[in-house]
Amino acid sequence: MNLSKEELEHSFQETIDLVLVHMAEHPEVAPEKFYSMACMLENLGFFSPILYEAIQTSPKE
């Protein structure tokens, strides 16, 4: 399955948003842990173009 850079960014951001919503709605997630995880996920989303390039240029099997 080949995704374009834009498709990957869009689906990656949708997934991050979904995870954050579920974490926010879960009463057992401590606010400090939620904030830390939200920052990490947002950073991953920011670097998704770099991740895409790394995946595309990796050696093919």
Image (cartoon, rainbow, N blue to C red):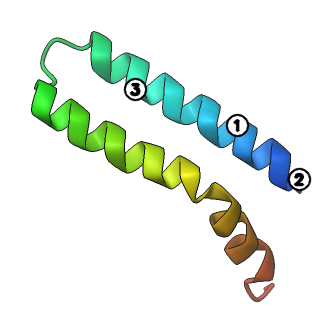
Q: Is residue 11 left or right of residue 31?
A: right
Classed neighbour count for the residue bearing mark 2: other residues with Cα under 10 Å, few (<14), some (14–19), many (≥20): few
Disc 1, SS: helix
Question: Looking at the rendering, which quadrant does residue 33 occupy?
Answer: top left
Disc 2, SS: loop
Which numbered disc flags the more N-terminal residue, 3 or 2? 2
Classed neighbour count for the residue bearing mark 3: other residues with Cα under 10 Å, few (<14), some (14–19), many (≥20): some
- Real-space Cα separation, disc 3 to disc 2, in angstroms: 24 Å
Above or below 15: residue 26: above
Q: Residue at x 51, y 35 (%)?
A: 16
Above or below 25: residue 53: below
Residue that numbered label 2 is attached to = 4
Disc 3, SS: helix
Expressed as whole percent of the image width and height from the top left, the position of residue 19 reads: 43, 28
Question: Looking at the rendering, which quadrant does residue 20 occupy?
Answer: top left
Q: In the rendered structure, which amino acid carries the disc numbered 3?
A: Leu
Q: Which mark is residue 45?
A: none
- Real-space Cα separation, disc 1 to disc 2, in angstroms: 11 Å
Of residue 26 and residue 40, the one placed in the foreground of this image is 40
Quadrant that contains the N terminus: bottom right
Expressed as whole percent of the image width and height from the top left, the position of residue 42 reads: 45, 43
Q: In the rendered structure, which amino acid carries the disc numbered 1?
A: Ser
Residue that numbered label 3 is attached to = 20
Question: Looking at the rendering, which quadrant does residue 26 occupy?
Answer: top left
- Real-space Cα separation, disc 3 to disc 1, in angstroms: 14 Å
Residue that numbered label 1 is attached to = 11
Expressed as whole percent of the image width and height from the top left, the position of residue 21 reads: 41, 18
Q: Residue at x 57, y 33 (%)?
A: 15
Expressed as whole percent of the image width and height from the top left, the position of residue 36 reads: 23, 43
